[in-house]
Amino acid sequence: MQFNFSKVTNSRLMGSMGLLIHWKNEEEDFYQYFLLDAEGLGIADYVSLKNPTIEEAYREEERLMGGFGADRLKISEEQALFLVNYFGNKNYYYEKELPGEISEYIDVIKKYKTNLTIEDLYPIICKKVTEEVEFINYMTMRFIAWDKEGLKYFSKSNEISSMHITNINGTLLKTNVISKGKGKYISEVLYEDNDGYYTCKLAFNIEKKEDDFRIKSMLVSEKEPIYDFEVFDEISKPEFVSIYSLNKQEEFIEKFYQENPFMLRSDMEDATFFTRFNFNNDHVKKDIYLISNDIKAIYYQIENKFLVGTYSEQDRKFINKILDCNYKEYLKIDEEIYFEENVLYDFVESGSNDFYDFLD
C-alpha cells in the first residue's frame, strides 16, 4: 500500500501524542492509530482499521486525539515512520509490551532507517509557547515527569536534564508561579510520586533565543511530604452536579459515546464514566496551574441515574443544554446541586450506587 497522509498532535509538552497514519491502494484503506508516551512507555496504545467508513475513521481519530487539547499537524511518511520506530524502541528499552496487533508495525521498529532525530521533530510535536508563565509550567511538568529528553531540548544542558526529584515519572498536580523579574521565576510545586505526595520549589532563569524559550539555569529545593487530605484541599474546586433519571441505559450510553468520541470512556462493572476535556490547554498559561483544569465535565452512569459534574456556571448551562437538546428521550433532570468541593469523582471511587446515600 502507498502512504496517503499522516498527522500528529503537537502535545509533546504534555507528555504524550496521538499519531495517525493512513495507507491506501485501489482495494484497501488502512488506518493506524498510535498513542505515543514520551514519559517512559513508548507506544502505549495501538489500534488499526481496515476499510472503515468515514464515520468510523473519524470516531477513532477523535478517541485518540480529541482529549489532547492540541493541534493536529500533517507530517511526512519519513517523519511518521521515524516516530513509530523511535517510540517503539522505547518499549524495548523500558521492557514494556508493545500494544495491539504488533505484526502491523513491528518491521518499522526493527528495520526502518532514517537520518532524522527526535530533535528534528520537536518543532512539530511541541506547541509554540508564547508566554513565560506557560513555559515555566511546562518545564515544571517535564521536571516532575523526570523527562530528561524534554529538559535537554529546552535547556541544551546535560546538567539540567539530569536533575530530578521524583523516584519515577511523577505527576504534577499544582503550581504557583511567581515572577521575580528579568526571566527569573519561582515555581511552587505540588506533585505525586510513587510513595506519596510532596511539595517543593523550583527556581528558573529563562531566556528567549531565536524566538523560543530556553532554560538558562535551574535550582531545586528539598522536597517536603504532604498528607492526602491536604492535597485534596489544594486541588479541589467548586462543582455543580446535575442529576438525571435515565431510561434505555445501554442504548443511551452507546449513542452518547458514538456522538462524543473525543471523550475518555471508562467502563466499570455496573457503571460507565466519561471525561470531557477542554479543546485547548490554555490552563497551562495561568500563574496557578491545576491538573484538573483541563476537564470541562465528567459524566457518570450508574443504574438508572446519569450524573454530570461541571466547574463553572457557564459550563453547567452549556453542558446541560446539550443534554436537554440531544438526549431528551433518554434523560429527565431531577436536581442540580452546588458543592464547594469536588464530590462526584469521590462518589465514583466510593463504589456506592446511590448518590444521596453517599452524601449522607
Image: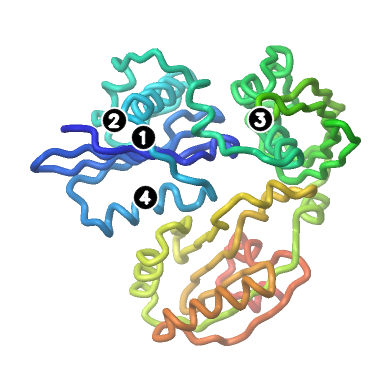
Amino acid marked by disc 4? Glu
Marked residue nearer the N-terminal end (2 or 4): 4
Amino acid marked by disc 2? Ile
Q: Quadrant of residue 270?
A: bottom left
Which residue sits at x=40%, y=52%?
A: 63
**Secondary structure type for disc 2:** helix
**Secondary structure type for disc 1:** loop
Which residue sits at x=49%, y=83%?
A: 324
Q: Are marks 1 and 2 in contact (CB under 8 Å)?
A: yes
Q: How far apart are the alpha carbons under marks 2 and 4?
A: 19 Å
Q: Position of residue 30 (x, y in %)?
A: 21, 41
Which residue sits at x=48%, y=26%?
A: 121
Marked residue nearer the N-terminal end (4 or 3): 4
Instruction: Say which mark, if any, is on residue 102.
Output: 2
Quadrant where the C terminus sits is bottom right
Mark 2 or 3: in front is: 3
Amino acid marked by disc 3? Asp
Q: Is residue 145 left or right of residue 298?
A: right
The residue singled out by tag 1 in the image is 99
The residue singled out by tag 3 in the image is 211
Quadrant where the N terminus sits is top left
Q: Residues within 10 Å of mark 4 (few under 14, many from 20)?
A: many
